[in-house]
Amino acid sequence: MFSRTIDLIGPEQLEKIKSMHVLVLGLGGVGSFAVEALARSGVKHFVLVDKDRVDASNINRQLPALHTTIGQAKVDLMKERILAIQPDAEVITYHSFYNFDTKEEILSNPVNAICDCIDTVTFKIDIQREAYERSIDAISVLGTGNKLDPTFLEVERLDKTTYCPIGRVMRKKLKDISKHVKVIYSKEQQTKYSTEKRTPASMVFVPSSAGILAASVLIRNRLEKIK
């Protein structure tokens, strides 16, 4: 199944991808596409964390969200997708949030890459601190709501981000390590037709592109670091 991948990077590089153990936090519009890209790239070891179940409002942008899956846990649905792609993959799931009560158990798993796709800034900050202290490769996807154009997405060091409220908070809290934190963010001017709801508006284009880009960063980092 990986013949086209081998044609691009070679068999030895594929084995490096297969040896990755990736923790993915959040399986919404960003995280679900990141998981899919990682699985189709050859990653065989996953730890998936998400407390949510599929809601009808997710169908416009989230990979596991269908009319037939409403009410089902996202971690279970994404595990099914991974195993449908790679039946011999190892997938550990936590139907819970990453927080101060759950993080020790979650991080007790052997992990050498982290894909942060959660919304809560407190725990985006915490996971980056943990990744730095544990020398784990990590990427954090910042806000993708109220945005329409994926060509504005950039991969950047946290200390160099601009025009991003989440990035501003994270820079302040992670000032001592901000140059070591890699993020994906967008400089697109935020727009929103409806101002009645505080929930960010979103379509499929930016979250999915950010998720695939995050997977690409982790894969390319892996191949470059262990040549």
Image (tube, rainbow, N blue to C red):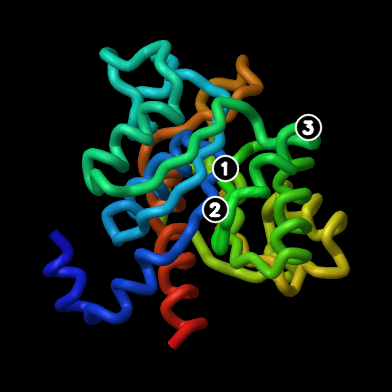
Percent x, y for residue 14?
29, 72
- Is the C-beta separation of discs 1 and 2 under 8 Å? yes
Q: Where is residue 115? Give x, y as percent.
A: 54, 53
Nearer the camera: disc 1 or disc 3: 3
How much space separates mark 1 and mark 3, taking CA atoms?
Answer: 15 Å
Q: Position of residue 146 (x, y in %)?
A: 54, 37
The N terminus sits in image quarter:
bottom left
- Above or below, 225 against 119 in this view is below
Report which residue position mark 2 lands on: 115
**Mark 2 residue type:** Cys
Q: Position of residue 178 (x, y in %)?
A: 77, 67
Nearer to me, 68 or 92: 92
- The circle drawn on residue 101 is 3
Residue at x-position 48% and y-position 65%: 218
Q: As shown in the figure, which amino acid type bears the numbered disc 1?
A: Leu
What is the quadrant of the C terminus in the image? bottom left
The secondary structure type at the circle numbered 3 is loop
Earlier residue among tags 1 and 2: 1
Who comes first in sequence, dot 2 or dot 3? 3
**Residue occupying the point 58% across, 29% down:** 200
Report how far apart the C-alphas of labels 2 and 3 lie in the structure. 20 Å
Q: From the viewer's perspective, is 181 left or right of 151?
A: right
Cα separation between marks 1 and 2: 6 Å
In this picture, residue 130 sits left or right of residue 115 = right
Left or right: 64 as drawn, with respect to 134: left
The residue identified by callout 1 is 25
Q: Amino acid at mark 3?
A: Asp
Q: Nearer the viewer, residue 22 or 35?
A: 22
The numbered mark at residue 209 is: none
Name the outermost residue toward the bottom: 227
